[in-house]
């Protein structure tokens, strides 16, 4: 391909075809006729030396080469549009932007009500959608699933991702207030549950992927112990409701545990080994870093989440069971 003679307008056609898989729909998106899009596709095929799309029924299926161009092409066009449009002053009061946030139902409970009150005052026309985390693909969701930003535990991210710390979470053990085994052992809320009791009781586990092991199991494994996970649920509310109506116990981030315990009749205890704190971050694709509405909403979320950057109210760092190594000592 001779780049000096290549018509860069063809890249907009290629982007539209990759998005719609249809010459007709691509034409509608670009205000071009269907024959004009077909002609542009022919020029693209000649210039790039690849068929780019293969007709399958009524749809165009992209070739492997065309698929490999999609993410970079979309990013390039967005950067070009941003460069040419400049960065006007953002007026949240006039915003009608719609942004999608991915996170667990922890944030449906503890962020979204705060954010709703905040937006109703400052940005009443802005729409925010909270969607579930994509199992096993949390970070990738901000690049491929129409998600603008995601809230998740700190992790290594690819170089196209930006992130910002929001808060830390310790974990508390939750059980129904009249749990028979805990009551029989004579342990009051706020105490450390003995290791043998903790491991002997049946546990519910928050796991969108349905995994039977979590942070608590990793901490126990480091001292050669294990617990009995007998139920997993994809949402924290399911875990908490199951615990409130059974003899199951669970490890829950302390902010959520403290928020819902009075409403669900739950008692809170320290686990026998430290679990956490887990650092929670907000992640997004670098291509959106300078987008005014995106940047403004990120700042509001960070401000509201700073209120959750606390330690457990029942006392952080309570002593573990006498004679027991902490997870940190055991490593």
Image: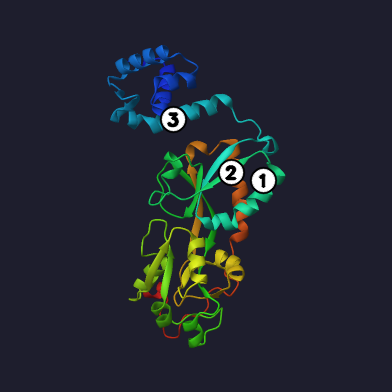
Element type where label 1 sits in the image? helix
> What is the spatial separation of the Cα atoms under label 1 and label 3, in whole angstroms?
30 Å
In the displayed orientation, state which residue is furthest to the right.
Answer: 121
Q: Residues within 10 Å of mark 2 (few under 14, many from 20)?
A: some
Q: Which residue is mark 3?
A: 74
Q: Is residue 106 left or right of residue 214?
A: right
Whether residues under marks 2 and 1 lie with C-beta atoms below 8 angstroms apart, the answer is: yes
Find residue 313 and report its image quarter: bottom right
Whether residues under marks 1 and 3 lie with C-beta atoms below 8 angstroms apart, the answer is: no
- Give the residue displayed 42% in from the left and 29% down from the top: 19
Name the spot of residue 293 as percent of width and height, x first: 60, 38
Depicted 78 relative to depicted 222: above or below: above
> Which quarter of the rendered picture does the N terminus lie within?
top left
Which mark is nearer the camera, 2 or 3? 2
Name the spot of residue 291 as percent of width and height, x first: 56, 36
Residue 6 seen in the figure:
no
Which of the two discs, 1 and 3, labels the residue nearer the N terminus?
3
Which of the two discs, 2 and 1, labels the residue nearer the N terminus?
1
> What is the spatial separation of the Cα atoms under label 2 and label 1, in whole angstroms?
9 Å
Q: Residues within 10 Å of mark 1 (few under 14, many from 20)?
A: some
> What is the spatial separation of the Cα atoms under label 2 and label 3, in whole angstroms?
23 Å
Residue 79 seen in the figure:
yes
Which residue occupies the foreground of this view, 151 or 6?
A: 151
- Give the residue displayed 33% in from the left and 14% down from the top: 42
Q: Is residue 113 left or right of residue 243?
A: right
Name the spot of residue 43 as percent of width and height, x first: 34, 14
Q: Which residue is mark 2?
A: 128
Q: Is residue 99 left or right of residue 272?
A: right
Q: Which residue is mark 1?
A: 119
Which residue occupies the foreground of this view, 9 or 241?
A: 241
């Amino acid at each position: 391909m001779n780049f000096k003679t290549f018509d860069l307008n063809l890249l907009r056609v290629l982007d539209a075809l990759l998005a719609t898989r249809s010459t007709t729909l691509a034409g509608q998106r670009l205000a071009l006729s269907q024959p004009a899009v077909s002609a542009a596709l022919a020029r693209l095929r000649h210039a790039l030396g690849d068929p780019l799309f293969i007709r399958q029924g009524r749809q165009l299926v992209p070739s492997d080469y065309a698929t490999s161009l999609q993410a970079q092409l979309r990013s390039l066009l967005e950067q070009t549009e941003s460069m040419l449009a400049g960065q006007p002053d953002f007026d949240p009061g006039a915003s009608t932007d719609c942004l999608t946030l991915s996170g667990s139902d922890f944030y449906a409970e503890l962020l979204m009500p705060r954010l709703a009150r905040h937006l109703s005052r400052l940005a009443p026309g802005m729409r925010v959608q909270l969607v579930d985390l994509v199992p096993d693909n949390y970070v990738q969701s901000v690049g491929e699933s129409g998600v603008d930003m995601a809230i998740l535990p700190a992790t290594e991210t690819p170089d196209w991702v930006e992130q910002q710390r929001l808060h830390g979470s310790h974990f508390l053990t939750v059980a129904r207030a009249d749990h028979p085994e805990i009551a029989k052992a004579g342990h009051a809320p706020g105490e450390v549950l003995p290791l043998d009791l903790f491991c002997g009781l049946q546990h519910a586990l928050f796991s969108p992927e349905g995994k039977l092991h979590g942070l608590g199991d990793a901490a126990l494994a480091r001292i050669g112990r294990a617990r009995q996970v007998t139920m997993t649920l994809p949402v924290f509310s399911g875990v908490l409701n199951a615990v409130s109506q059974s003899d199951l116990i669970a490890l829950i981030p302390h902010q959520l545990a403290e928020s819902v315990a009075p409403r669900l009749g739950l008692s809170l205890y320290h686990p026998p080994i430290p679990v956490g704190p887990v650092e929670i971050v907000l992640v997004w694709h670098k291509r959106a870093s300078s987008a005014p509405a995106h940047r403004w909403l990120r700042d509001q979320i960070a401000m509201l989440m700073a209120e959750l950057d606390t330690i457990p109210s029942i006392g952080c760092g309570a002593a573990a069971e006498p004679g027991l190594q902490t997870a940190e000592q055991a490593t």
